Every structure is written in structure tokens, then in C-alpha cells.
Image (cartoon, helix red, strand yellow):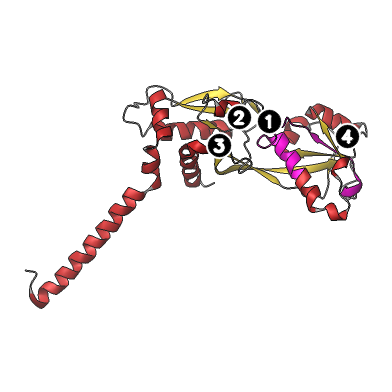
Amino acid sequence: MLKGEQGKKLRRALIIAGAAAAVILLALLLRPEPVLMNSAEIANVWNNGVLRVGLRNDVPRLAEDGTGLEWEIAQALAERIMSNSDDYTGDIPALEAVEVTSMSVGAKLRDGSIDAAICLMPRGANAAYAYSRAYYDDPCYILVKPGNENADMSKLKVGCIQSASSSNLYVPSGATRNLLFSYYSDYKDSGYNTANITGYASYTDLFDALDKGQVDAIAINELMLNKYGEGRAYAKHTADIGTLHYAVATLSANSAIATVADMMLSEMGY
């Protein structure tokens, strides 16, 4: 049947079909998600019977009263991971939400209290963490009193939220401060001096300092502006200090969960 000239075409077709099947099999074997689901950190989640995610509960629209985008992402990620376990029946919740603050999330990741954090963690801010792609972009602004939108930034006294050194690399207050300092560094040859930046302990103190003229401007991210700026008189300066990009974060040694989150967010259109 496979001999002679007539068999040549059939032999060629079988070779092509075999090669295609091998490619498909190899692709299936090399698909990242099945490999990730066999990782030690995913196995640990399955053994616990639940994905423990650090979540805030004080950010309107993203995480407030157990609702918001971050809670929705956490639930979707938990169901994706747990549904791949042979022992998971769906009869119990896949997600264990652990409330965290900007000051406690790092410690809870390090001591294993949570498997992942979905709580305004700026992507790529700290090498100790692995990150997914961004699920939310949060622009940062310089706010001034109305009429001063084009004032020379190098001559302004600027306020921002001060952060403890243990957290300033990955919480939004510290990340906004970092963007501000980076902006000043970029323009240091134009007379920008970080000595003109003053730290404040709370957003209320920050806005009060602007209202009372203790500073000429304040740096703040949009989410916190929407939360604390209502009823305040301010204008946005023309300076652009940058944008924070929030991502799902895990310890860098436990990157499988962050990678699964990255794949899931990609499928969701992020």
C-alpha cells in the first residue's frame, strides 16, 4: 500500500500528519498553565483547600466592604487555581480573604499568612515580589490652588504622604512619593531640589497643608484623591509625575501564582 509512486504521496501525508501531531502534543506539554499547576506553591494552596489573598477594604471601587475590582479578581483567581485540584468540588469557597493594610501586607506575604496580594501593589516596585500584568492604572497628580496650574514646579513647596522605610517600595503612598522624587531627579539640572518636599502622616494633614498655605502643592494618586479630595478646592498642575500600575503580587520565590494571575488577566483583556 505504501510502496511505489502511489504510496509516496500517502507516506508524505502520514509524515506530515505525524509531525503535526507531534507539534500539537509538544504544545500541550509545554503549555505554561499545566506546568504551573504542578508547582509546589500551587500544591500548597490545594493542600490548604483555599487560596488566601491579602485584600484591602478601604478603597472605593477597588476594595470596599468586600466588593470591587480587586475582590472580583481575587475570587476569579481562587476559582481558577482551586478548580484544577482533583479534590475540589466547589462546595466550599475557593477564596479566603485576609484583610491587610499598606503596612501589613508585606509581612503577611513573608510569613505565609497569604499566598498572594491584590491590594494596590505597584507592578515591579520591589524585587522581593513577583507580579502579574497590571489590572489598574492609577495616575498621580500635583495639586495646587486654582490659578497656579502653570506655576514653576521647581520653586514650589510640595507635600506628599511620608512612608515607613519598610513599606515605601510597594504601597501607593510610598510609590507616589517615589514617583515625585524620580521626577525631581529627572529635572535636577533645572533647579529641582528635594529639600522642597515635605512629608505628612495622613491625607487629611496633606490637604490641610495645601489649604493653609503650608505647601504650594501636593502629590497624590487618583484613587486617594477621589477618596479624600471631595469638597476641597484644588486644581491639577500641568506637571506629569507618572502613573502607578497595580498588579497581583506574590513572593518572588512563589511566582507560579502570579504567573497564573498574569495569564488570567490577559484572557480577561488586561
Q: Which mark is residue 106?
A: 2
Dot 2: what SS? helix
Dot 4: what SS? helix
Closer to the camera, 116 or 203?
116
- Mark 2 or mark 3: whose residue is earlier in sequence: 2
- Mark 2 or mark 4: whose residue is earlier in sequence: 2
Q: Quadrant of the N terminus?
A: bottom left
Q: CA distance from mark 2 to mark 3?
A: 10 Å
Q: Is residue 49 visible?
A: no
Q: Amino acid at mark 1?
A: Ser
Q: Which mark is residue 249?
A: 3
Residue 94 relative to residue 250: left or right:
left
* Span highlighted in magenta in the image: 153-180
- Mark 4 or mark 1: whose residue is earlier in sequence: 1
Residue 80 x, y percent position in the rendering: 42, 35
Q: Amino acid at mark 3?
A: Ala
Label 1 or label 3, whichever lies nearer to me, is 1
Dot 3: what SS? strand
Residue 93 x, y percent position in the rendering: 43, 23
Res 131 → quadrant: top right
**Residue at image coords 18%, 64%:** 14
Closer to the camera, 47 or 248?
47
Question: Which residue does the numbered mark 1 point to in the structure image?
Answer: 166
Q: CA distance from mark 3 to mark 4?
A: 34 Å
